[in-house]
Image (cartoon, grey):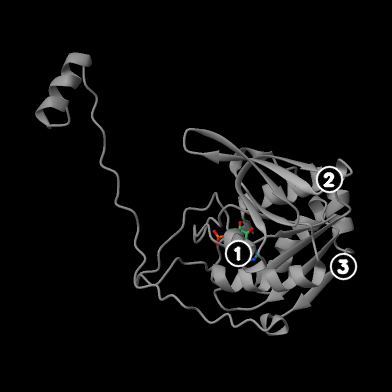
Amino acid sequence: MKILVPVKRVIDYNVKPRVKSDGSGVDLANVKMSMNPFDEIAVEEAIRLKEAGKAEEIVAVSVGPAKAQETLRTALAMGADRAILVQTDDEVEPLAVAKILAKIAEEEAPKLIITGKQAIDDDSNQTGQMTAALLGWGQGTFANTVDVDGDAIEVKREIDGGLQTVKLSLPAVVTTDLRLNEPRYASLPNIMKAKKKPLDEKTPADYGVDTAPRLTTTNVSEPPVRQAGEKVEDVDALVAKLKAAGAI
Ligand code: AMP
């Protein structure tokens, strides 16, 4: 079984984003960029399936600028076998990414696509679902546990208040939730080896996909600054304050 793992280059999750002064977006100049954390979980899960003898090949794909090569090399260093960079400097929206992934899936014929549940820059939570829809495949989103069994996959999904178990026939799309696994760090020897693994370079036009944005961002603003809290003497004082504020 072949597994396709889309990985997105995003602002590092430890970086506090700064909004551009004209409100047109987030300032990415000289900001540390990394693999989207949910995609690290997707790569890890694919590697675990390979280690368990349930997959033979892992192909990492990224749609983005030339620097997304670094993100793909990280996936290769973790354990992916080869990579495809679909290079564009446009800001690509989930539908365009999904169309590209669907075309790659038609060419590569993977049995499984594992995406992150969301990219932490746009928080769209759309790409995996759209890819499944375009391909007419089943989808197991927000995966907490996956279990491949022959031509089917059982996915325990994180839903409000618990876990839901779905069984999908392969090929299928799975999107990762936070508790699926803890991704490994790439070792130094594997980082060196990853430099020699194959990385194909393509463009959206190779797949006949127009990446021109369909959405216009009208404004980006900082969240409101939190007001300082206040210490109270005891529970009675707290209750009195809450009553006075009409909160209870
Ligand atoms: P989103 O729908 O943007 O929240 O992204 C969900 C998931 O789709 C991500 O976690 C990635 O696995 C995948 N994805 C989104 N955009 C890209 C991209 N430009 N390149 C590769 N994978 C992507």
User: From this viewpoint, which residue is outermost toward the left?
Assistant: 244
Q: Is disc 1 placed on a helix, strand or loop? A: helix
Does mark 3 have its CB less than 8 Å from ligand 1? no
Residue that badge 3 annotates: 198
The tag on residue 183 is none
Specify whether 199 is left or right of 31. Answer: right
Split into quadrants, the picture shows ligand 1 in the one at bottom right
Q: Residue at x 71, y 80 (%)?
A: 207
Task: Locate residue 246 relative to residue 181 in the image: left or right.
Answer: left
As helix, strand or loop, the secondary structure at mark 3 comes to loop
Residue at image x 85%, y 50%?
Answer: 55
Q: Is residue 67 in view?
A: no
Label 1 CA crowd tier, 10 Å (few <14, some 14–19, many 20+): some
Residue at 82% from the left image edge and 55% from the top image edge: 80
Q: Amino acid at mark 2?
A: Gly
Residue where numbered disc 1 is placed:
133
Going by the numbered disc 3, the residue's amino acid type is Pro
The residue pinned by badge 2 equals: 150
In terms of sequence position, does the residue under pointer 2 or pointer 3 come before the other? Answer: 2
Q: Earlier in the sequence, mark 3 or mark 1?
A: 1
Give the alpha-carbon distance from disc 3 to disc 1, as whole Å. 29 Å
